[in-house]
Amino acid sequence: MTLSKTLKTLAISAGLGLMLGGLAQGQMATQPTPPPEMDAWLKAAKLGSYDTGKHDWAEIEKLAIEEGEVIIYSASSRMGKVASAFMEKYPGIKATSYDLGSVKTIEKTVREQNANLFNVDIVTTGGSGQVIHELWAKNRIVNFVPDMFYDRIPAENREPVLIRVLEAVVFMYNGEAYPDQPPVKNMWELTEAPWKGKVVMKDPLQSLTNYMGVATLVQNADELAAAYKRYTGKDIVLSDGVPDAGYEYIYRLLRNDLVILKSGSKSAAASGKPGQAKPPTSFGAMTYYRYNFSRGLVNAFYKDIDPAAKIIYPTYTAIARQAPNPNAAKLFTAFLLGSTELTADTKLEKPYKEGRSAELLLGLLPYFEPGSKSPRDDVPFPEGGDAWDAMKAWTVDPDFMFREGPKVRDFWIQESAG
Amino acid sequence: MGQPEGTSIYFQIRRLFNSPERLLAVFFLGLLSLLVITPLIEIFWDALSYQEYDLAYRPDAEVGGFTLFHLERVFTGRLSRALFYKPLVNSLMIGVGVTVLAVSMGSALAWLMVRTDLPFRGFFGAMAVVPYMMPSWVLALAWMTMFKNDRIGGSDGLFTFYFGVQPPDWIAYGMLPIIITLSLHYYAYAYLLVSGALLTVDSELEEAGAICGLSRSQQLWRITAPLLLPAIGSAVVLTFIRILGTFGTPALLGLPVRFFTFSTQIFVSLNAGSTGDGYVLAVVLVLMAIVFIYINTRLLGVRRSFVTVTGKGFRQRRIPLGRWRMPLAILIGFFIVSTVFAPLILLAWESLLITPGEYGLGKLTLHFWIGEAGEDFVDGDAGVLRNDQILAALWNSLRLGFFAAGINGVAGLLISWLDDVQGPGKHCLCALHLPLHRPWRHLFRDFFHQLRPHAGALRHLCPAGPYHHGQEPALYFADRNIGAVTDR
């Protein structure tokens, strides 16, 4: 071996080492090589590395009907409706959705697989850090993107794991008490005396959604610091032992007697119930806006609040490792994404759950409402939903969630105990 | 002496097979070890090893490797105050408060029912155990409906609706309502145990006291009360331990004012995926339970009630209440109404409201009960009596309840019988009463995931898990009561 060659090899291995080191540092997730029994299943099911990206849907449907069943673990109660609609379209396949919530969906999947139980076909839940790092990066789920939607879904919405629906955490105020404009323009105003005991949220320790929301506030510490300066004209002074403006924001919210509730719908009702003299502001999932239509609430979004108006979090869907009904799972995944005939120009008429609209929306239907967005870029917004594009967004980062999330949670536990 | 060894073993085995109680004991010892000790090992294992979640702090740690990290976090770290000390103090305060209130209420009620000529005893007696049959958080929900104020925003409580005044936070949430609502639920332990014991007290003893010149209250305090001590002691321990583990009520009424207890903290830790912290806390809870049971047996002996040595003839004379008869009846009636009927009526009423907070008679609907699916109402869901998912869940609950109660009942009865007939090994069985503890349920669930190879409807119900009202004291409870019966 010549010297130059040796040097080259050394340089390459050093470079590789640095790269690998860098990966470990940032804890970027990768999917390891599947073990033999999983590989055999992947091969039979044409998934993973055996997935050519071209799918024969007539064949898949035939096999799915032979399988006759699909089991879904879901964090959404509305998935039961999707399952019913699926069974109407495919009467030969029994779809059963277990509404477990995000924490239990992940826990149940992990514990069953640890015990060599492979019962579930579809796992669909939020909880970015865990879905990517604990499920996908540990070979517990397999990504599957139906070929007809591949070009209609932006890469970030289908890699590494397909997103089924995008939702957001937002601040909401009472639109009846403040008809002309929102009561505050900057997030920091909510940490001040007039809002003492007047900001409510569902406990982020009991809600992965709000946990992600709170952690993403912390993640954007620099922007929060800048917003503080825009609001007060001064640089922020951090409290004792608080590391940055992100944590400082959480700290001050809690010190301002933040009200913590057990349920998201109660939190939405707190801000949105009509007839209140001094209604609070609520922090929570944007989809609770739907209660304006079904429960007579009068919530409104802070569309322009400084520094960001919404925190986007994805709900993933994937096929579980060694799923007993992989073809039914594929068919169900396609159903979740709606009809191929649906395009950006399609006019959908209310009520969406009837007639042509329902036929086009399929599995998107229960989530077709303001505050939710399909991962596809060619699905129109429902009535009242176009605010989505106008609101400045932060997006939940699975790697930050996994690396920093526990610290944010500990900070919360420590400071909320008072 | 003199028996060859082989014969001896043969003899022992034959003896074993000849005495079914020994076989049963071995069986239960094995079963309960599986159910109690295996999860215990798992608890310790998880508490003392790195979990996925710890990687945020110790990126180089290996998941599953041994560590004292969780112990540090819970007992000495900067989080310890929030994770351990504050919740512990809150739990102990609630425990003491509820125990004092519930045991006095329960004992007084038992005495009135069993030993006095209170009117409507049959009806009151039947009603007095109803609160215990309802989940304890039903009362908490009813309290919320009644007294919630604008702190948690949204709809008004009934009190505000009718009087236009917002109840202060300390009435609406936190320690006081938690103690009151839990007491109104858990007085049933004291009531059942003390009335059982009271039935065994011979009136002739009191008469003997009377002959010796004791006044009626002296008879009560010097003769009857000491005889009830074992029952009251059991009630105290049972209530106290149960309160330490109770979750639903503190979660509902404590959270809005950030009042955390030991059990809500355990729940939060487990739910948030930091099982290490959660299990350390769970172990502390279990140790506390063991200590209290130990104190109870030390103080009162292992017997569950005293056997009074009397001659033949056992009778019970009811003590006339005289002019207190009607006022006490009204008081008890009021008590029953406020613990049994009021919460149920409040919740039933709430279930008829179209919009929460508007209690007017014109604004009621039966939709939530019998409404059809598809109306633009409640997200288009059908009313509960037409909703297949809810009906399926109900059926699952019924089956679960039936089998759990059946197994608990039979096992409790048999173990209790063994307790009485068996000599050696008895203490092992006593130790196995442990599963009356809440964290255990979480573990059972995990454990059965690994034990049961096939998917089944019941298993899928389990994930609703740790915050459901449970049966776990039943085994212990059945044992104790049957003990009282067989002693008699």
Image (spheres, helix red, strand yellow):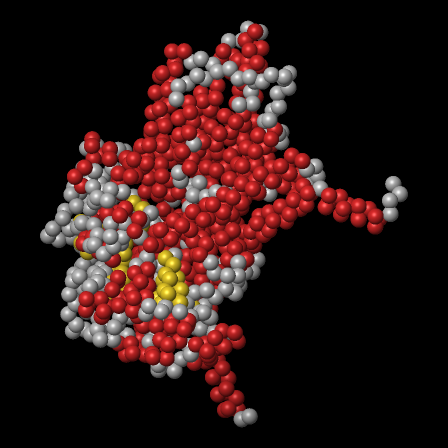
Picture residue at 17% right of the left edge, 46% below the top: A274
Residue located farthest toward the bottom when viewing the structure as drawn? A2
Q: How many marks?
A: 0
**Residue A378: in sight, yes or no?**
yes
The residue at 38%/11% (across/down) is: B323
Percent across and percent down for residue B220 are: 51, 16
Question: Can residue B82 be seen in this snapshot?
Answer: no
Query: Up-down: is B297 above or below A125?
Result: above
* Direction from residue B302 to residue A359 in the image, left or right: left
* Closest to the observer, B305 or A184: B305
Q: Nearer the viewer, residue B169 or A184?
A: B169
Where's residue A154, x and y in %?
28, 75
Residue at position x 60%, y 49% in the image: B31
Q: Quadrant of the C terminus of chain B?
A: top right
Query: Please, is residue A380 above or below residue B103 in the view?
Result: below
Question: Which is nearer the eye, A206 or B54?
Answer: A206
Q: Residue furthest right?
A: B2
Q: Give the residue at x 20% y 64%.
A: A354
Q: Is residue A331 above or below residue B372?
A: below
Q: Quadrant of the N terminus of chain B?
A: top right
Say which of B261 and B459 sits in front.
B459
Residue B149 on image: x %, y %:
25, 37
Residue A365 image point, x, y percent = 25, 64
Q: Quadrant of residue B312?
A: top right
Outermost residue toward the left? Answer: A180
- Would residue A340 appear left or right of B49 to someone viewing this image? left
Vertical placement of residue A369 versus B81, above or below: below
